[in-house]
Image (cartoon, helix red, strand yellow):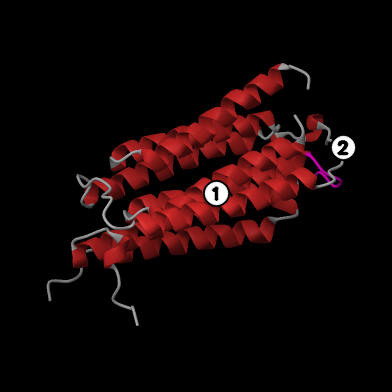
C-alpha cells in the first residue's frame, strides 16, 4: 500500500474528530472526539516510521509517547468532568459559560 | 493497483475505522457512541499491524480499546447519560461546522495527493520489539522517565480533582 492511503485515512479521521468537537454538546463525546484526532496523528507517526526518505523506528516510539500522554489527558479530563458535573449537574458544554465575557 | 492481501486488509480496516467514527458522530445514545469509538480504536490497531508496528498495535488495544474506552464509560455512567443529543436551534452552527471541516479536509487530502512522496520503504525485518526496547532505554531514556513522572502527576491530579470536597 502506498503511504498516501494511510495519510488520507488519518486526514479523514482527523476531520471526523474535528466535526465532533465542534458540534457535539456532551462533554464526554467531545473528549472522545479529541481522542480520535490524537489517534489520527498517531497513525501518521507510525506510517512515517515505515515510509519516507528517513524511515526509522523512532516514529513508533513517538507514537508510544503520544499514547501515554493521551491516556493521562483522558484521565484528567474525566476527573475535571466529574468535578464539574458535581457542581453544575450537567455535562452540556454549552452550559459551562461562567467565563463568558 | 495490485490486489494483494495487504490491500484487502487495508480496505477492511479503513472501512471499519471510518464507519466507526461516522457512527460515533451520528448515534444519539451516548453509550452507543462509546462502543462505536471502541470499534474504531480496534481497527486502528489492525492498521498498525499492517504497518509492521506490532508492539504499538498491542499497546493501542490495551490503552485505547481497554483503558480509555472503559474510563469514558465510567465518565458517562457517573454523569447524566440518559440524555440524547438534542437538535434545537443549532442548525446554522452545524452547517457552518460541516462546511468548514469539509473544506479543511479537502485541502488536506489535495495536499496529500499532490505530495511528491518517495516510494522507498523501510526494511520491516529490523522493526522488532527488541530494537524498540533498545532505542527506548538507550536513546530516549530521559523522555521515558519524564513520561513516568507525568503519569504519576496525572494520577495524583485526577484523584484530587475527582475527590469529593470536604464536608464544609
Of the pair B77 and B61, the residue shown nearer to us: B77
Q: Which residue is mark 2?
A: B120
Of the pair A94 and A81, the residue shown nearer to us: A94
In the rendered image, residue B63, in percent from the top left (x then y), is placed at: 48, 42
Q: Nearer the viewer, mark 2 or mark 1?
A: 1
For label 1, the crowd category at 10 Å Cα-Cα, with few meaning under 14, some 14 to 19 and many 20 or more, is many
Q: Is residue A52 magenta?
A: yes
In the rendered image, residue A20, in percent from the top left (x then y), is placed at: 43, 50
* Residue B59, picture quadrant: top right
The magenta-colored residue range is: A51-55
Say if labels 2 and 1 share a chain.
no
Give yes or no for contact between labels 2 and 1 (Cβ–Cβ under 8 Å).
Answer: no
Cα–Cα gap, marks 2 and 1: 28 Å
Of the pair B100 and B118, the residue shown nearer to us: B100
Q: Which residue is mark 1?
A: A15
Helix, strand or loop under label 2: loop
Chain holding disc 2: B
Q: Left or right: where does residue A61 sit relative to residue A26?
A: right
Q: Which residue corresponds to the image point at 68% horizontal and 56% vertical from the top-left?
A: B141
| B9 versus B41 height, above or below | above
Chain holding disc 1: A
Of the pair A78 and B55, the residue shown nearer to us: A78
Amino acid at each position: 500500500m502506498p503511504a498516501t492511503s494511510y495519510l488520507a485515512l488519518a486526514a479523514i479521521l482527523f476531520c471526523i474528530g474535528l466535526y465532533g468537537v465542534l458540534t457535539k454538546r456532551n462533554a464526554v463525546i467531545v473528549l472522545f472526539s479529541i481522542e480520535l484526532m490524537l489517534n489520527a496523528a498517531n497513525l501518521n507517526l507510525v506510517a512515517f516510521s515505515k515510509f519516507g526518505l528517513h524511515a526509522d523506528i523512532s516514529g513508533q516510539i513517538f507514537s508510544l509517547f503520544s499514547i501515554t500522554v493521551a491516556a493521562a489527558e483522558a484521565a484528567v479530563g474525566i476527573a475535571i468532568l466529574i468535578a464539574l458535573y458535581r457542581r453544575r449537574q450537567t455535562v452540556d458544554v454549552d452550559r459551562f459559560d461562567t467565563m463568558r465575557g | 493497483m495490485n490486489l494483494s492481501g495487504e490491500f484487502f486488509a487495508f480496505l477492511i480496516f479503513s472501512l471499519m475505522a471510518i464507519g466507526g467514527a461516522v457512527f460515533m458522530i451520528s448515534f444519539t445514545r451516548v453509550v452507543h457512541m462509546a462502543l462505536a469509538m471502541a470499534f474504531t480504536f480496534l481497527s486502528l490497531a489492525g492498521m498498525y499491524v499492517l504497518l509492521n508496528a506490532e508492539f504499538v498495535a498491542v499497546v493501542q488495544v490495551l490503552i485505547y480499546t481497554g483503558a480509555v474506552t472503559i474510563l469514558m464509560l465510567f465518565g458517562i455512567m457517573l454523569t447524566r447519560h440518559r440524555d440524547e443529543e438534542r437538535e434545537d436551534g443549532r442548525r446554522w452552527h452545524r452547517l457552518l461546522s460541516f462546511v468548514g471541516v469539509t473544506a479543511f479536509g479537502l485541502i488536506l487530502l489535495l495536499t496529500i495527493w499532490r505530495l511528491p512522496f518517495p516510494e522507498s520503504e523501510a526494511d520491516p525485518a529490523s522493526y522488532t520489539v527488541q530494537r524498540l526496547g533498545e532505542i527506548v532505554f538507550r536513546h530516549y531514556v530521559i523522555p521515558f522517565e519524564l513520561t513516568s513522572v507525568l503519569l504519576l502527576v496525572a494520577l495524583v491530579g485526577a484523584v484530587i480533582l475527582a475527590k469529593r470536597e470536604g464536608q464544609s
